[in-house]
Amino acid sequence: MTRLTNIQLFCILVITMVPTPYQVLAKLLAVTVAQHGWLAILGSILPGFILVWAYYYILVNSSRPFPGLLEEHCGTVTGKILGFIYIWVFYLVAVKSLVIFANFFLSNVLPGMPISILLIFIILPAFYALRKGLEASVRTVELITITGYPLAMLLLFFGLGPETDWSRLLPLGGFAVADLFYGILLVSTYSSFMIVVLTLGPFCHQPGNLWKWMFSAYGLFLLSTLVIAAIPIVTYGSALTSVQTFPAFNIARSTNIAGFIHNIEIILVSAVITGVFGVLAIFWFVTCYSIQQVFGLQDYRIMVGPTAIMAGILAVLLVPNIHFMYIMLERIFPWIFITLFGLLPLLLALVIRLKRPKDLQPGMMAGNN
């Protein structure tokens, strides 16, 4: 597999975690905890750091990348069963990114555009990149992070106009503790997308310094989600934010700075497209690579074509119902992702800690072999 630099892996982790919350997290938190979404983000700091530690601990005590390390630590049969389950969950993230973007585009930009045509424009570039190999996708993701991420964040700050009222983040009371904990769960769902590091981390040039880049990516994710959650609230208030489909787009559409900077929503769409490409390409690759490892295939690229067709069909079926999509995002997907991307890795790290193989020294990784 292609060797990765640590900065490239940092870019991959940022892109896998940030674009989806950029589109939907403000609404989800406004519905769940109203103006207290920023408290949920602060509350997710400790669980997130524990999760990052678990990923790194698994990496330095494994000789194979994910999902092969499941067979190493859980046995061949159990490892393959878990690996098969993870194939579908990784694929679910890739399809979900398509569905969210298609709903975003069709509800705000070109409502009458055929869904299939829109999906082709998203799937084909990722398909081409994966067929060319991981290196093409990684270099594209690196460029997206350097250019698209700062632009997307800057566009949100443009929404801070005369109508901004920071007191809308208050009061601190008046929320149910259960709702706050569910808000923390929602935020932790997206930080758990860092699980891709278990597949890609072993192939870094300097795996010993990987933990610094993982914590840096998580810190940037926290900062990004604070901005994503807070700016719509101080601009519109929690009630209006909770009924908007994509608050970030509405901020870009209404931005007007001194009558000179306005109508910048097309710039936001461009930034979102690149972010969706990154999420789709990385999780699509991890899906195909997992299939290769679980079923012992010679090359993951033979699965790119069949999975592309399936992704298109599933996305077409799911796109027309945006209400159903948000129900899935709020009530179903978080439990799936936090269980398989969060709780199971934590359990695996505990198993490794209690029963570390005697022939495997800490710090051994596939990338060192």
Image (cartoon, rainbow, N blue to C red):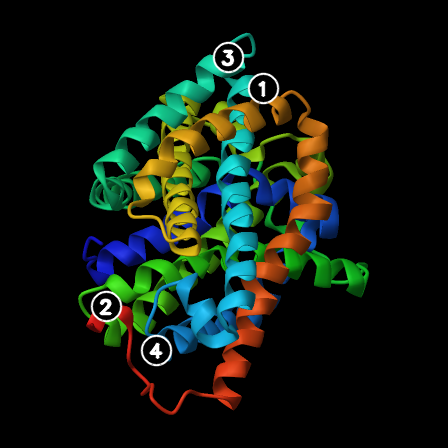
Relative vertical location of residue 97 with respect to residue 344 in this rendering, above or below: above
Secondary element at tag 1? helix
Q: Which labelled disc corresponds to residue 367?
A: 2
Q: Earlier in the sequence, mark 3 or mark 2?
A: 3
Give the label, 3 or 2, closer to the camera. 2
Secondary element at tag 4? helix
Residue assigned mark 1? 107
* Tag 2: amino acid: Gly
Image coords of residue 338 (percent x, y): 61, 59
Q: Tell me the crowding category of disc 3: few under 14, some 14 to 19, or many 20 or more residues within 10 angstroms, Cα based.
A: few
Residue assigned mark 4? 60
Residue assigned mark 3? 110
Secondary element at tag 3? loop
Q: Name which residue lies at 37% across and 35% down.
A: 304
* Tag 4: amino acid: Val
| Quarter assignment of residue 179 | bottom right
| Quarter assignment of residue 327 | top right
Q: Quadrant of the C terminus?
A: bottom left
C-alpha span from label 4 to label 1: 45 Å
- Image position of 108 (left or right of 217): right
Q: Earlier in the sequence, mark 4 or mark 1?
A: 4
C-alpha span from label 3 to label 2: 45 Å
* Tag 3: amino acid: Leu
Q: Name which residue lies at 50% across and 12% down.
A: 110
Q: Quadrant of the N terminus?
A: bottom left
Give the label, 1 or 2, closer to the camera. 2
Q: Tell me the crowding category of disc 2: few under 14, some 14 to 19, or many 20 or more residues within 10 angstroms, Cα based.
A: some
C-alpha span from label 1 to label 3: 7 Å
* Tag 1: amino acid: Ser
